[in-house]
Image (tube, grey):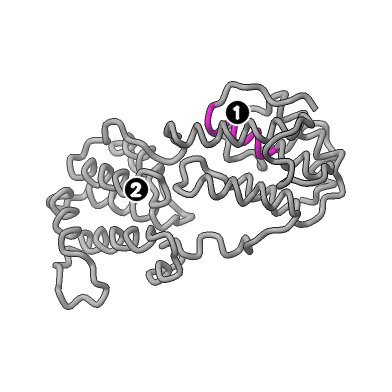
Amino acid sequence: MSAEDRTSGAEPEVQPWANLGLSRMDAEIRRIHQLERAAVPLPPVATTIRELITRFEICHFKAERHVQRIIAAIGEMRLDLAPATIGTAHPKSGETAWRQDRTGRSRPGQEYIWVLQMWLAEAPYSDLDPRGIPRKLVDRVNGALGQPNAQKRLLVLALLARLLLKADRSPLPAELAPFWEQVEATDICHYTFPDNLERMIQAIGRLEPAADFVGCGSCNPEGREMARRHFEALCTWLRGERGSLDAQLGDRTPVKEWLAACLAKTLKEVAALREPMPQF
């Protein structure tokens, strides 16, 4: 849908705000929608930056880097990456995708995936395995999962589908439904990895959902403070007051104001901040 089509109605579209989990569009989003309507026609780069805001996750271990990148993109009206390359180092992109990773996350994540697959196949560890999977990891995962049975197999299959971000993930049967929310909230990009995955594996071994599980969509105190700091800086800029983002965001334009407001609202909601957005 083009920007002109999307902004032609009085009500904002839900999809751009999909990462907020809102049941309805509130007054602040409606005001931001008016900013978007005033900014049309939008340059293609603005649409791409908006897509990055929609994809933002407060629970991602690089959440602050993502915020900083989006702010820089708004100020310069250009991106320092090709959006198509996002996620290419994630295990979803293949068993060797970790070779492209510079964070050190993908390789451990891939190792867990290999070990879970080995458990399903009841394949023994071998020193000759060219993948170089750590023996301690194999022993720990196998020990936590215990002997295979039908229920554990279904849970491990569901967990693997989630870790690999398979699009066709099927809900668990009714007797295992209490696990579904936790399985779907397990990812190697979460700030608690690998603890979150270890907890999920242990829960499967016990056939009991994990207690005090922290997964996707959660926000720790450090993440909330980071979001608050950037939210307040964006609001200062949106009010036209002098602040820390003046040089970075540069000259004010309708497009920049709309994007800055989108990012500020996103940070507010994902971090459960109570401060109101500025009046536009």
Residue 267 belongs to magenta span? yes
Q: Amino acid at mark 2?
A: Phe
Identify the disc placed on residue 35. none
The secondary structure that dominates the magenta segment is: helix
From the image, tell me which residue sits under label 1.
23
Picture quadrant of residue 236:
top right
- In the rendered view, does 77 fall on the left or right side of 244? right
Residue 187 belongs to magenta span? no
Q: Amino acid at mark 1?
A: Ser
From the image, tell me which residue sits under label 2.
193
Q: Spatial distance from mark 2 to mark 1, Cα to Cα? A: 29 Å
Picture quadrant of residue 136:
bottom left
- Asked if residue 129 is positioned above or below residue 124 in the image, the reply reads below
Picture quadrant of residue 84:
bottom right
Q: Is residue 222 visible?
A: yes
Mark 2 or 1: in front is: 2
Percent of width and height locating residue 224 = 49, 32
The residue range painted magenta reads 262-272
How busy is the neighbourhood of tag 1: few (under 14 within 10 Å), some, or many (20 plus)?
few
Name the residue nearer the viewer: 99 or 10. Answer: 99
Q: Earlier in the sequence, mark 2 or mark 1?
A: 1
Percent of width and height locating residue 278 = 73, 25
Q: Is residue 92 visible?
A: no
Name the residue nearer the viewer: 262 or 222. Answer: 222
- In the rendered view, does 213 fall on the left or right side of 72? left
Secondary structure under tag 1 reads: loop
Q: Residue at x 38, y 58 (%)?
A: 105
Q: Residue at x 27, y 35 (%)?
A: 209
Percent of width and height locating residue 33 = 78, 35
